Image: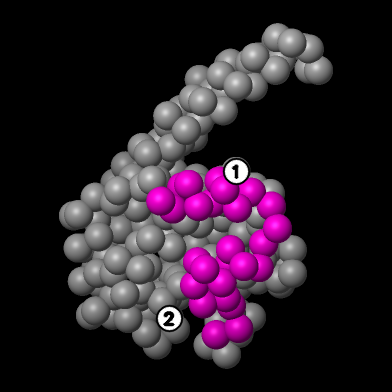
Amino acid sequence: MTATSTITRHAQAPKAGSVVTPERYQQGLDSFKAWMGAIELNKEDFQRHYDEWQPDAGDVAAIKAAVEKHGVKALVLGEDWCPDVWRGLPTIARIGELTGMEVRYFKRDENKDIMSEFLKNGEFESIPVIALYDRNHNYLGHWIERADRANAEMPALRAILAGVERDTPAWDEARKKYNTATWEYAEGWRDAEASELRALIEEALG
């Protein structure tokens, strides 16, 4: 994936007069720990993604340089029931901690006015959303849902469940295979997310 395609896909600017003012941004949860304390579901999945990911040193160094030079910061929209959020939110959390990037976390369903500015294809409330700003709160771009690599590999995952009748022993077995395969793909998807965020930042800042 090139920086250009990342920006084209994910970085359509929000409407004029964004509700994400500097003051509103500061109202978000200020750490992964705070997010974990505010959610009820799937804490083990969030924590596992957080603990298992080993970021690429080059991506971390490049993002850290942008943070130090431009004050890059992130706003994250998510919900605890969403598998894409279980994986995507811990990834940006780790990036923030490793680079010094400020990250603020918001629950989507409590902040629909923010969500309305970052609809996928102008229509879908897809999450997570990771919106990026510089130190002066100038909008840089945003990333939605999952990496292109994940989208490309999703059909192979879905094929595991294709044609299997729900609520049967075969379905239970297929779900186990699906869940196992999802974790096998996870490392590459987290890596791809970090690379796409790096590309988005580098393209936005020139």
Residue drawn at (30%, 48%), measured in percent from left and top? 54
Residue drawn at (55%, 46%), measured in percent from left and top? 45
Q: Which secondary structure lies at badge 2?
A: loop
Q: How is the image coloured?
A: one colour
Q: Quadrant of residue 71?
A: bottom left
Q: Position of residue 55 (x, y in %)?
A: 29, 51
**What is the quadrant of the N terminus in the image?**
top left
Q: Are marks 1 and 2 in contact (CB under 8 Å)?
A: no
Residue marked by disc 2: 138
Q: Which secondary structure lies at badge 1?
A: helix
The amino acid type of the residue labelled 1 equals: Pro
Q: Is residue 85 above or below residue 12?
A: above
Q: Does the segment drawn in magenta span residue 40?
A: yes
Residue drawn at (44%, 83%), measured in percent from left and top? 137
**What is the quadrant of the C terminus in the image?**
bottom left
| Side of 103 where 61 appears, left or right | left
Q: Quadrant of residue 58?
A: bottom left
Q: Position of residue 48 (x, y in %)?
A: 48, 47
Residue marked by disc 1: 83
Earlier-in-chain disc, 1 versus 2 = 1
Q: Position of residue 188 (x, y in %)?
A: 36, 37
Q: Is residue 125 above or below residue 191?
A: below
Q: Position of residue 46 (x, y in %)?
A: 54, 51
The amino acid type of the residue labelled 2 equals: Asn
Residue 71 tag number = none
Q: Which residues are magenta?
A: 26-51
Q: Does the segment drawn in magenta span residue 98?
A: no
